[in-house]
Image (tube, rainbow, N blue to C red):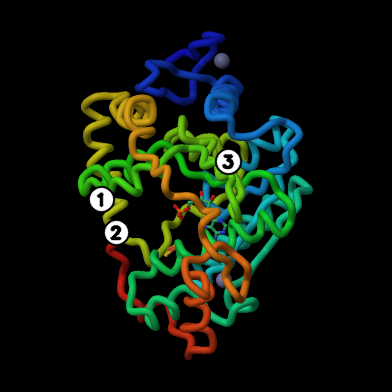
Amino acid sequence: MKCRVCREPAVIDIRRHNANFCVPHFEKYCRDQVVKTIDEFEMARPDERLLVAVSGGKDSLAVWDILHDLGYAADGLYIGLGIGDYSDVSGQHARAFARQRGLHLIEIDLRESYDYDIPTASKVTKRVPCSACGLSKRHLFDSAALEHGYDVLVTGHNLDDEAAVLYGNVLRWQTDYLGRQRPTLPGRHGFPRKVKPLVRLSERETAAYCVLRGIDYLVDECPMAAGNKHLRYKEALNATEAASPGSKHAFYFNFLRNAAERFVDDNNDASTLGSCQRCGSPAESELCAFCRLVERTAGAEPVPVELVRKSSR
Ligand code: AMP
Ligand code: FES
Ligand code: ZN
Ligand code: ZN
């Protein structure tokens, strides 16, 4: 197996591109894919300030590393979700990465700042953990980016993530979600621009990137997400991809090219929303969904992770 570029021994094969790469050319391939994605979807200009949401997993550390390497001013944001050891270890990875590269990491701990955590919120609201988790993360990503003056909020979603979400949304024809699945969501009243620069890279590639760059990341999946629908959709797509390399990429990118625009809801104008009386975020009622969650769960008796039923998101 030889590198496509320099003919030296290759360390990775990428079947959908019918290409093998050595270490330096694989790293260059990853950076080039990110540059292409940023350009194509107008994600960020060189002078803008980026906030990267980092979970301590491979994707978000890889995207932070690549953006930093490309010369962007990119700080990190880590949210302590209070999911037992999983959260403790994920925080350690995010902190260690920031320390090693001298990067700035903003930290928000749900328990310290809002007196709840995800297992407890799940129990109190009687909803799957991913529901309170997603709501909390979305709100804190937006509010931290705006409060600290960042232009763009970056997440580490990769091709496998986006194809699996698309698959789930198409299976049920959830058209309102389909309209929000583009890799760049423009900033609007009360929301920063949100971008996913890794959508051209697969999970296997971001993992390989971290290993080859010596980035120590948390390998474990969230214990509360085990067995959820999202993971089952990924398995289904992996089976298709194995039989027909490139189908995952085609599924997602042809959707973006041929169909995504049709689902954008022009009536979904955030400027018509009111403001939350507590935190000032856009809200459909007196309080935004996040402040309502805090009101319901803050101060409740903490529930250990093991006592919360598994998600079936
Ligand atoms: P997930 O929803 O766990 O698949 O994560 C998707 C993306 O959200 C990651 O790539 C990160 O960019 C971001 N993210 C997930 N968990 C956290 C966290 N605890 N703190 C900050 N960002 C996170
Ligand atoms: Fe959100 Fe697991 S990371 S429920
Ligand atoms: Zn090479
Ligand atoms: Zn609020």
Q: Which residue is mark 2?
A: 228
Q: Which residue is mark 1?
A: 232
Residue 158 got which mark?
none
Sooner in the amino-acid sequence: mark 3 or mark 2: 3
Q: Residue at x 32, y 30 (%)?
A: 259
Label 2: few (<14), some or many (≥20) within 10 Å? some
Q: Residue at x 74, y 52 (%)?
A: 149
**SS class of the residue under badge 1?**
helix
Label 3: few (<14), some or many (≥20) within 10 Å? many
Label 1: few (<14), some or many (≥20) within 10 Å? some
**SS class of the residue under badge 3?**
helix
| Three-letter residue code for mark 1 | Arg
Question: Which one is in front, 146 or 241?
Answer: 146
Q: Please provide percent x and percent y for residue 207.
A: 49, 40
| Three-letter residue code for mark 3 | Ala
Question: Which one is in front, 254 or 65?
Answer: 254
103 on left or right of 160? right
